[in-house]
Image (cartoon, helix red, strand yellow):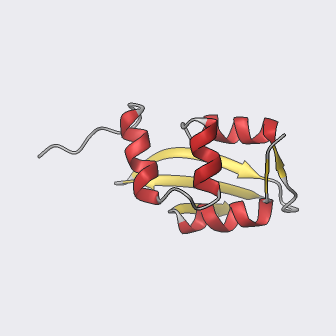
Amino acid sequence: MASLNGKNTNKNLLKKGFAKYNNDHNFFEFWHKGMLVTRTKTSHNSQDITDGLISAMSKQCKVSKDFFKKFAKCEKSQDDYISELKTNGILENDKN
């Protein structure tokens, strides 16, 4: 069973453009071009994130579980995340 380090995941979400919006709990939002795209949360005690919670967070972040694990481990960048959201039809592709 896979798990993610909670403390590292929190730090990495912030590095990737997510904003923490509640100081009592770890609630995160991702905004793109002024539009709220996703919301997710982690445990406030920074415990490991288990497989079931990884699945829930990946759905909240609108990406596959495999992509989310790589994203949370800093194997994927914010640009990769935006590209994935465009591929999944969540964000519109830029018009030239």
Residue 23 appearing in the image:
no
Question: Quarter-wise, where is residue 53 in the image?
Answer: top right
Residue appearing at x 80%, y 35% in the figure: 52
| Residue 88 to residue 39: above or below | above
In the rendered view, tell whether residue 65 sits above or below residue 25.
above
3 to the left or right of 19: right
Residue, far left:
96
Quarter of the image where one finds residue 64:
top right
Image coords of residue 67 (percent x, y): 57, 43
**Considering depth in this image, is 26 or 56 the residue closer to the camera?**
56
Answer above or below: position of 71 versus 7: above
Q: Is residue 28 visible?
A: yes
| Viewer-side residue, 40 vs 80 | 80
Q: Position of residue 31 (x, y in %)?
A: 46, 53
Q: Position of residue 32 (x, y in %)?
A: 40, 53
Q: Of all residues shown, which one is farthest toward the top?
A: 89
In the image: residue 45, left or right of residue 32: right
Counting every numbered tag in the picture gives 0
In this rendering, the answer to whether 30 lies above or below 16 is above
> Residue visible at 74% across and 59% down?
26
Residue 1 at what x, y percent from top left? 84, 40
